[in-house]
Amino acid sequence: MRAYRIDSPEGIQALKIVNLPEPTPGPGEVLIAVKACSLNYRDSLLIQGGYPRNRTYPVIPLSDGAGEVVGIGPGFTRFKVGDRVAANFMRDWLGGPINEHALLSSLGGGINGMLAERVCLPAHSVVHIPGHLSFEEASTLPCAALTAWNAVTSANTKAGDTVLVLGTGGVSIFALQLAKAFGARVIATSGSDDKAAKAKALGADSIINYRKKPEWHEEVRNLTGGVGVDLVLEVGGPGTFERSIKATRVGGTIALIGLLDMGTEPPNIIPLLLNAQKVHGIYVGSVAMFEDMNRAITVNQIRPVIDRVFPFEETRQAYEHLMSQKHLGKIVIRVGEG
Ligand SMILES: NC(=O)c1ccc[n+]([C@@H]2O[C@H](COP(=O)([O-])OP(=O)(O)OC[C@H]3O[C@@H](n4cnc5c(N)ncnc54)[C@H](OP(=O)(O)O)[C@@H]3O)[C@@H](O)[C@H]2O)c1
Protein backbone atom coordinates (compact mmCIF):
# COMPACT_ATOMS: atom_id res chain seq x y z
CA MET A 1 0.00 0.00 0.00
CA ARG A 2 1.05 3.60 -0.53
CA ALA A 3 1.64 5.99 2.35
CA TYR A 4 3.45 9.23 2.97
CA ARG A 5 6.28 9.14 5.48
CA ILE A 6 8.37 11.87 7.10
CA ASP A 7 11.83 10.58 7.95
CA SER A 8 13.14 13.88 9.31
CA PRO A 9 11.57 17.34 9.72
CA GLU A 10 13.15 19.08 6.74
CA GLY A 11 10.03 20.88 5.45
CA ILE A 12 7.76 20.08 2.49
CA GLN A 13 10.44 17.96 0.77
CA ALA A 14 10.32 15.64 3.79
CA LEU A 15 6.97 14.30 2.51
CA LYS A 16 7.77 11.16 0.55
CA ILE A 17 5.53 8.43 -0.87
CA VAL A 18 6.61 4.98 0.29
CA ASN A 19 5.30 1.47 -0.35
CA LEU A 20 4.62 -0.40 2.87
CA PRO A 21 3.17 -3.84 3.60
CA GLU A 22 -0.59 -3.76 4.21
CA PRO A 23 -1.23 -3.99 7.97
CA THR A 24 -3.18 -6.94 9.41
CA PRO A 25 -5.67 -6.30 12.23
CA GLY A 26 -4.84 -8.07 15.50
CA PRO A 27 -7.29 -8.78 18.36
CA GLY A 28 -9.47 -5.74 19.04
CA GLU A 29 -8.28 -3.90 15.94
CA VAL A 30 -9.95 -2.69 12.76
CA LEU A 31 -8.39 -2.26 9.32
CA ILE A 32 -9.52 0.96 7.63
CA ALA A 33 -9.34 1.75 3.91
CA VAL A 34 -8.66 5.48 4.19
CA LYS A 35 -10.73 7.57 1.74
CA ALA A 36 -9.75 11.09 2.76
CA CYS A 37 -7.48 12.98 5.15
CA SER A 38 -7.43 16.60 6.22
CA LEU A 39 -4.70 19.02 7.25
CA ASN A 40 -4.26 21.03 10.42
CA TYR A 41 -1.84 23.83 11.29
CA ARG A 42 -0.02 21.29 13.49
CA ASP A 43 0.88 19.26 10.39
CA SER A 44 2.76 22.20 8.91
CA LEU A 45 4.77 22.48 12.15
CA LEU A 46 5.51 18.76 12.32
CA ILE A 47 7.22 18.69 8.91
CA GLN A 48 9.42 21.58 10.06
CA GLY A 49 10.25 20.18 13.51
CA GLY A 50 8.48 23.11 15.19
CA TYR A 51 5.76 21.23 17.08
CA PRO A 52 6.27 21.32 20.84
CA ARG A 53 5.58 17.60 21.50
CA ASN A 54 5.21 14.17 19.84
CA ARG A 55 8.07 14.59 17.41
CA THR A 56 8.63 10.97 16.43
CA TYR A 57 10.40 10.33 13.11
CA PRO A 58 9.99 8.45 10.85
CA VAL A 59 6.22 8.88 11.04
CA ILE A 60 3.19 8.60 8.75
CA PRO A 61 1.70 12.11 9.05
CA LEU A 62 -1.80 13.45 9.75
CA SER A 63 -4.16 12.91 12.65
CA ASP A 64 -7.24 13.37 10.52
CA GLY A 65 -8.74 10.76 8.23
CA ALA A 66 -11.96 8.92 7.45
CA GLY A 67 -12.58 5.68 5.65
CA GLU A 68 -14.30 2.34 5.52
CA VAL A 69 -13.72 -0.71 7.71
CA VAL A 70 -12.34 -3.48 5.46
CA GLY A 71 -11.06 -5.92 8.09
CA ILE A 72 -11.68 -6.86 11.70
CA GLY A 73 -9.29 -8.58 14.10
CA PRO A 74 -10.17 -11.83 15.87
CA GLY A 75 -12.96 -11.75 18.43
CA PHE A 76 -14.24 -8.26 17.84
CA THR A 77 -17.82 -7.23 17.00
CA ARG A 78 -18.42 -3.47 17.65
CA PHE A 79 -17.67 -2.59 14.00
CA LYS A 80 -18.44 -4.52 10.85
CA VAL A 81 -16.93 -4.50 7.39
CA GLY A 82 -18.37 -1.57 5.44
CA ASP A 83 -18.79 0.76 8.46
CA ARG A 84 -17.82 4.40 7.77
CA VAL A 85 -15.41 5.58 10.45
CA ALA A 86 -12.84 8.12 11.62
CA ALA A 87 -10.12 7.75 14.23
CA ASN A 88 -9.71 9.91 17.31
CA PHE A 89 -6.76 12.38 17.34
CA MET A 90 -5.42 10.72 20.52
CA ARG A 91 -5.70 6.97 20.09
CA ASP A 92 -5.74 6.30 23.84
CA TRP A 93 -7.94 9.11 25.22
CA LEU A 94 -11.21 7.26 25.53
CA GLY A 95 -13.03 9.54 28.00
CA GLY A 96 -12.73 11.37 31.31
CA PRO A 97 -9.90 13.78 32.04
CA ILE A 98 -6.86 13.78 29.75
CA ASN A 99 -3.74 12.01 31.03
CA GLU A 100 -0.04 11.74 30.21
CA HIS A 101 -0.39 8.41 28.43
CA ALA A 102 -3.11 9.75 26.09
CA LEU A 103 -0.88 12.69 25.16
CA LEU A 104 1.73 10.30 23.79
CA SER A 105 -0.76 8.60 21.47
CA SER A 106 -1.57 11.38 19.00
CA LEU A 107 -1.83 10.18 15.41
CA GLY A 108 0.64 11.59 12.91
CA GLY A 109 2.95 12.85 15.68
CA GLY A 110 3.52 10.50 18.61
CA ILE A 111 2.47 7.47 16.53
CA ASN A 112 1.79 6.81 12.83
CA GLY A 113 -1.12 8.76 11.36
CA MET A 114 -3.73 8.50 8.64
CA LEU A 115 -2.00 9.47 5.36
CA ALA A 116 -1.88 5.89 4.07
CA GLU A 117 -4.16 3.71 1.96
CA ARG A 118 -4.71 1.29 4.85
CA VAL A 119 -4.50 1.99 8.59
CA CYS A 120 -4.89 -0.48 11.44
CA LEU A 121 -6.11 0.88 14.79
CA PRO A 122 -7.58 -0.40 18.05
CA ALA A 123 -11.37 -0.28 17.70
CA HIS A 124 -11.57 1.71 20.97
CA SER A 125 -10.05 4.71 19.13
CA VAL A 126 -12.49 4.67 16.20
CA VAL A 127 -15.95 6.26 15.87
CA HIS A 128 -18.77 6.03 13.33
CA ILE A 129 -19.00 9.16 11.20
CA PRO A 130 -22.27 11.11 10.72
CA GLY A 131 -24.38 9.55 7.95
CA HIS A 132 -24.98 12.80 6.04
CA LEU A 133 -21.26 13.53 5.58
CA SER A 134 -19.03 12.39 2.73
CA PHE A 135 -15.66 10.84 3.65
CA GLU A 136 -14.02 14.12 2.64
CA GLU A 137 -16.25 16.09 5.00
CA ALA A 138 -15.86 13.57 7.84
CA SER A 139 -12.07 13.57 7.49
CA THR A 140 -12.05 17.14 8.84
CA LEU A 141 -13.58 16.26 12.21
CA PRO A 142 -10.93 14.60 14.43
CA CYS A 143 -8.73 17.60 15.27
CA ALA A 144 -10.24 21.00 14.43
CA ALA A 145 -13.89 20.16 15.00
CA LEU A 146 -13.28 18.21 18.21
CA THR A 147 -11.08 20.98 19.60
CA ALA A 148 -13.84 23.51 18.90
CA TRP A 149 -16.43 21.15 20.43
CA ASN A 150 -14.33 20.66 23.58
CA ALA A 151 -13.92 24.43 23.99
CA VAL A 152 -17.56 25.30 23.34
CA THR A 153 -19.03 22.54 25.53
CA SER A 154 -16.49 22.82 28.39
CA ALA A 155 -17.52 26.48 28.76
CA ASN A 156 -21.18 25.35 29.02
CA THR A 157 -22.13 27.56 26.08
CA LYS A 158 -25.86 28.20 25.98
CA ALA A 159 -28.39 30.10 23.91
CA GLY A 160 -27.82 33.83 24.19
CA ASP A 161 -24.10 33.61 25.04
CA THR A 162 -21.59 35.49 22.92
CA VAL A 163 -18.62 33.55 21.55
CA LEU A 164 -15.57 35.15 19.93
CA VAL A 165 -13.57 33.20 17.33
CA LEU A 166 -10.23 34.46 16.02
CA GLY A 167 -9.48 34.10 12.30
CA THR A 168 -11.17 31.77 9.83
CA GLY A 169 -9.02 28.64 10.07
CA GLY A 170 -10.26 25.12 10.69
CA VAL A 171 -10.86 25.38 14.45
CA SER A 172 -12.51 28.81 14.27
CA ILE A 173 -14.96 27.94 11.50
CA PHE A 174 -16.06 24.79 13.33
CA ALA A 175 -16.41 26.85 16.53
CA LEU A 176 -18.61 29.30 14.63
CA GLN A 177 -20.86 26.50 13.35
CA LEU A 178 -21.06 24.71 16.72
CA ALA A 179 -21.64 27.86 18.76
CA LYS A 180 -24.47 28.83 16.40
CA ALA A 181 -25.97 25.35 16.89
CA PHE A 182 -26.01 26.06 20.64
CA GLY A 183 -27.92 29.29 19.98
CA ALA A 184 -24.99 31.59 20.72
CA ARG A 185 -24.15 34.88 19.06
CA VAL A 186 -20.78 34.71 17.29
CA ILE A 187 -18.28 37.48 16.73
CA ALA A 188 -15.42 36.53 14.38
CA THR A 189 -12.20 38.24 13.41
CA SER A 190 -10.30 37.89 10.14
CA GLY A 191 -7.36 39.54 8.46
CA SER A 192 -9.16 39.39 5.11
CA ASP A 193 -12.36 41.13 3.97
CA ASP A 194 -13.03 38.30 1.49
CA LYS A 195 -12.89 35.69 4.23
CA ALA A 196 -14.94 37.96 6.51
CA ALA A 197 -17.75 37.95 3.94
CA LYS A 198 -17.63 34.14 3.79
CA ALA A 199 -17.70 33.88 7.59
CA LYS A 200 -20.73 36.17 7.62
CA ALA A 201 -22.46 33.89 5.11
CA LEU A 202 -21.72 30.97 7.44
CA GLY A 203 -23.63 32.68 10.24
CA ALA A 204 -21.19 34.98 12.04
CA ASP A 205 -23.19 37.84 13.56
CA SER A 206 -20.36 40.39 13.44
CA ILE A 207 -16.89 40.40 11.90
CA ILE A 208 -13.88 42.54 12.73
CA ASN A 209 -10.87 42.85 10.43
CA TYR A 210 -7.95 42.56 12.87
CA ARG A 211 -5.51 44.06 10.37
CA LYS A 212 -7.60 47.20 9.93
CA LYS A 213 -8.48 47.28 13.64
CA PRO A 214 -5.49 45.94 15.58
CA GLU A 215 -7.25 46.94 18.83
CA TRP A 216 -10.13 44.61 17.92
CA HIS A 217 -10.93 43.90 21.56
CA GLU A 218 -12.36 47.46 21.80
CA GLU A 219 -14.76 46.69 18.95
CA VAL A 220 -15.74 43.43 20.68
CA ARG A 221 -16.56 45.33 23.86
CA ASN A 222 -18.61 47.86 21.87
CA LEU A 223 -20.53 45.04 20.22
CA THR A 224 -21.34 43.55 23.63
CA GLY A 225 -22.48 46.79 25.25
CA GLY A 226 -19.17 47.16 27.10
CA VAL A 227 -19.56 43.77 28.80
CA GLY A 228 -17.28 41.42 26.80
CA VAL A 229 -17.86 37.91 25.47
CA ASP A 230 -18.65 34.78 27.47
CA LEU A 231 -16.05 32.67 25.64
CA VAL A 232 -13.15 33.30 23.32
CA LEU A 233 -11.46 30.54 21.33
CA GLU A 234 -7.91 31.83 21.55
CA VAL A 235 -6.03 30.34 18.59
CA GLY A 236 -3.51 33.20 18.37
CA GLY A 237 -1.63 32.53 21.61
CA PRO A 238 0.85 34.92 23.26
CA GLY A 239 0.43 37.62 20.59
CA THR A 240 -3.35 37.89 20.94
CA PHE A 241 -3.90 36.68 24.52
CA GLU A 242 -3.91 40.09 26.20
CA ARG A 243 -6.51 41.42 23.75
CA SER A 244 -8.60 38.28 24.29
CA ILE A 245 -8.54 38.92 28.05
CA LYS A 246 -9.77 42.47 27.39
CA ALA A 247 -12.51 41.17 25.06
CA THR A 248 -13.86 38.72 27.71
CA ARG A 249 -16.50 39.51 30.31
CA VAL A 250 -15.97 39.32 34.07
CA GLY A 251 -16.08 35.61 34.94
CA GLY A 252 -15.85 34.60 31.26
CA THR A 253 -13.65 31.91 29.73
CA ILE A 254 -10.62 32.00 27.47
CA ALA A 255 -10.10 28.62 25.79
CA LEU A 256 -6.38 28.60 25.05
CA ILE A 257 -5.94 26.56 21.90
CA GLY A 258 -3.28 27.78 19.49
CA LEU A 259 0.00 29.50 18.90
CA LEU A 260 -0.47 31.26 15.55
CA ASP A 261 0.96 34.52 16.89
CA MET A 262 3.91 34.21 19.28
CA GLY A 263 3.95 37.98 19.96
CA THR A 264 6.97 39.97 21.10
CA GLU A 265 6.33 40.48 24.80
CA PRO A 266 4.74 38.29 27.48
CA PRO A 267 1.05 39.17 27.94
CA ASN A 268 -0.09 40.92 31.12
CA ILE A 269 -2.11 38.26 32.94
CA ILE A 270 -3.07 40.32 36.02
CA PRO A 271 -6.53 41.29 34.59
CA LEU A 272 -7.39 37.57 34.57
CA LEU A 273 -7.54 37.51 38.34
CA LEU A 274 -9.00 41.00 38.73
CA ASN A 275 -11.88 39.94 36.44
CA ALA A 276 -12.15 36.38 37.80
CA GLN A 277 -11.74 34.94 34.30
CA LYS A 278 -11.03 31.30 33.54
CA VAL A 279 -8.28 30.07 31.21
CA HIS A 280 -8.83 26.56 29.88
CA GLY A 281 -5.96 24.90 28.04
CA ILE A 282 -7.59 22.68 25.40
CA TYR A 283 -5.91 19.74 23.71
CA VAL A 284 -8.35 18.27 21.16
CA GLY A 285 -10.72 15.75 22.78
CA SER A 286 -11.57 12.19 23.79
CA VAL A 287 -13.37 9.41 21.91
CA ALA A 288 -16.43 10.02 24.13
CA MET A 289 -16.42 13.72 23.14
CA PHE A 290 -16.05 12.73 19.46
CA GLU A 291 -19.16 10.54 19.72
CA ASP A 292 -21.12 13.32 21.46
CA MET A 293 -20.03 15.81 18.81
CA ASN A 294 -21.05 13.51 15.96
CA ARG A 295 -24.56 13.24 17.44
CA ALA A 296 -24.81 17.05 17.53
CA ILE A 297 -23.45 17.34 13.98
CA THR A 298 -26.04 14.83 12.80
CA VAL A 299 -29.02 16.40 14.57
CA ASN A 300 -28.06 19.89 13.40
CA GLN A 301 -27.03 18.64 9.92
CA ILE A 302 -23.79 20.61 10.20
CA ARG A 303 -21.52 20.34 7.13
CA PRO A 304 -17.80 21.03 7.49
CA VAL A 305 -16.51 23.87 5.33
CA ILE A 306 -13.97 22.50 2.85
CA ASP A 307 -11.72 25.03 1.17
CA ARG A 308 -10.11 22.70 -1.37
CA VAL A 309 -9.55 18.99 -2.07
CA PHE A 310 -6.18 17.73 -3.38
CA PRO A 311 -5.40 14.31 -4.87
CA PHE A 312 -3.06 12.02 -2.88
CA GLU A 313 -0.23 12.66 -5.33
CA GLU A 314 -0.47 16.44 -4.69
CA THR A 315 -0.05 16.24 -0.93
CA ARG A 316 2.91 18.62 -1.01
CA GLN A 317 0.75 21.23 -2.78
CA ALA A 318 -1.93 20.72 -0.12
CA TYR A 319 0.64 21.49 2.60
CA GLU A 320 1.81 24.56 0.65
CA HIS A 321 -1.79 25.77 0.46
CA LEU A 322 -2.15 25.30 4.23
CA MET A 323 1.05 27.21 4.91
CA SER A 324 -0.04 30.09 2.62
CA GLN A 325 -3.01 30.66 5.01
CA LYS A 326 -5.18 31.53 2.01
CA HIS A 327 -7.73 28.91 3.01
CA LEU A 328 -10.97 29.28 4.94
CA GLY A 329 -12.01 26.12 6.79
CA LYS A 330 -10.41 22.81 5.89
CA ILE A 331 -7.99 21.44 3.30
CA VAL A 332 -8.60 17.81 2.31
CA ILE A 333 -6.47 15.14 0.61
CA ARG A 334 -8.36 12.42 -1.29
CA VAL A 335 -6.74 9.06 -0.59
CA GLY A 336 -8.95 6.27 -1.96
CA GLU A 337 -12.14 6.06 -4.00
CA GLY A 338 -15.33 7.19 -2.34
N1 LIG B 1 -4.98 22.80 21.29
C1 LIG B 1 -5.50 22.02 20.36
O1 LIG B 1 -6.03 20.95 20.62
C2 LIG B 1 -5.46 22.49 18.94
C3 LIG B 1 -6.21 21.82 17.97
C4 LIG B 1 -6.23 22.33 16.67
C5 LIG B 1 -5.48 23.46 16.40
N2 LIG B 1 -4.74 24.03 17.36
C6 LIG B 1 -3.96 25.25 17.09
O2 LIG B 1 -4.88 26.28 16.81
C7 LIG B 1 -4.33 27.16 15.85
C8 LIG B 1 -5.27 27.20 14.64
O3 LIG B 1 -5.26 25.94 14.04
P1 LIG B 1 -6.06 25.68 12.68
O4 LIG B 1 -5.75 24.29 12.26
O5 LIG B 1 -7.46 26.13 12.83
O6 LIG B 1 -5.26 26.69 11.73
P2 LIG B 1 -5.49 27.10 10.24
O7 LIG B 1 -6.64 26.37 9.64
O8 LIG B 1 -4.17 27.06 9.56
O9 LIG B 1 -5.98 28.62 10.41
C9 LIG B 1 -5.13 29.69 10.32
C10 LIG B 1 -5.98 30.97 10.27
O10 LIG B 1 -5.87 31.66 11.50
C11 LIG B 1 -5.99 33.04 11.27
N3 LIG B 1 -4.90 33.77 11.94
C12 LIG B 1 -3.57 33.70 11.71
N4 LIG B 1 -2.91 34.53 12.53
C13 LIG B 1 -3.87 35.16 13.28
C14 LIG B 1 -3.84 36.13 14.29
N5 LIG B 1 -2.70 36.69 14.71
N6 LIG B 1 -5.01 36.52 14.85
C15 LIG B 1 -6.18 35.98 14.46
N7 LIG B 1 -6.27 35.05 13.48
C16 LIG B 1 -5.12 34.65 12.91
C17 LIG B 1 -5.97 33.26 9.77
O11 LIG B 1 -7.32 33.51 9.37
P3 LIG B 1 -7.70 34.86 8.60
O12 LIG B 1 -6.99 34.80 7.28
O13 LIG B 1 -9.18 34.85 8.49
O14 LIG B 1 -7.19 36.01 9.43
C18 LIG B 1 -5.48 31.93 9.24
O15 LIG B 1 -5.97 31.61 7.97
C19 LIG B 1 -2.93 26.62 15.55
O16 LIG B 1 -1.98 27.27 16.38
C20 LIG B 1 -3.03 25.16 15.91
O17 LIG B 1 -1.79 24.57 16.21
C21 LIG B 1 -4.71 23.57 18.61
Image (cartoon, rainbow, N blue to C red):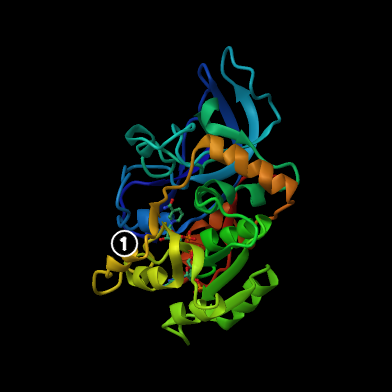
Pinpoint residue 220: horizontal percent, then vertical percent: 50, 77
Pinpoint residue 99: horizontal percent, then vertical percent: 36, 35
Q: Is residue 85 visible?
A: yes
Q: Secondary structure at mark 1?
A: helix
Measuring 57% from the left and 59% from the top, which residue is drawn there?
175
Determine the residue located farthest toward the top in the rendered image. 75
Q: Is residue 220 above or below residue 55?
A: below
Pinpoint residue 307: horizontal percent, then vertical percent: 61, 65
Q: Is residue 48 above or below residue 199?
A: above
Classify residue 269 as left or right of residue 252: left
Q: In this orientation, which residue lies closer to the viewer: 167 or 48?
A: 167
Q: Is residue 117 visible?
A: no
Q: In this orientation, which residue lies closer to the viewer: 294 or 87?
A: 294
The answer as to whether callout 1 falls within 8 Å of ligand 1 is: no
How many discs appear?
1
Q: In this orientation, which residue lies closer to the viewer: 163 or 310?
A: 163
Identified by mark 1, the residue type is: Leu
Determine the residue located farthest toward the bottom in the rendered image. 212
Q: Quadrant of the C terminus?
A: top right
Q: In this orientation, which residue lies closer to the viewer: 170 or 247?
A: 247
Pinpoint residue 114: horizontal percent, then vertical percent: 51, 42
- Which residue in the structure is indicated by mark 1? 273
* Mark 1 residue crowding within 10 angstroms, few (<14) / some (14–19) / many (20+): few
Measuring 42% from the left and 36% from the top, which residue is drawn there?
97
Measuring 66% from the left and 40% from the top, which residue is drawn there?
129
Classify residue 123 as left or right of residue 109: right
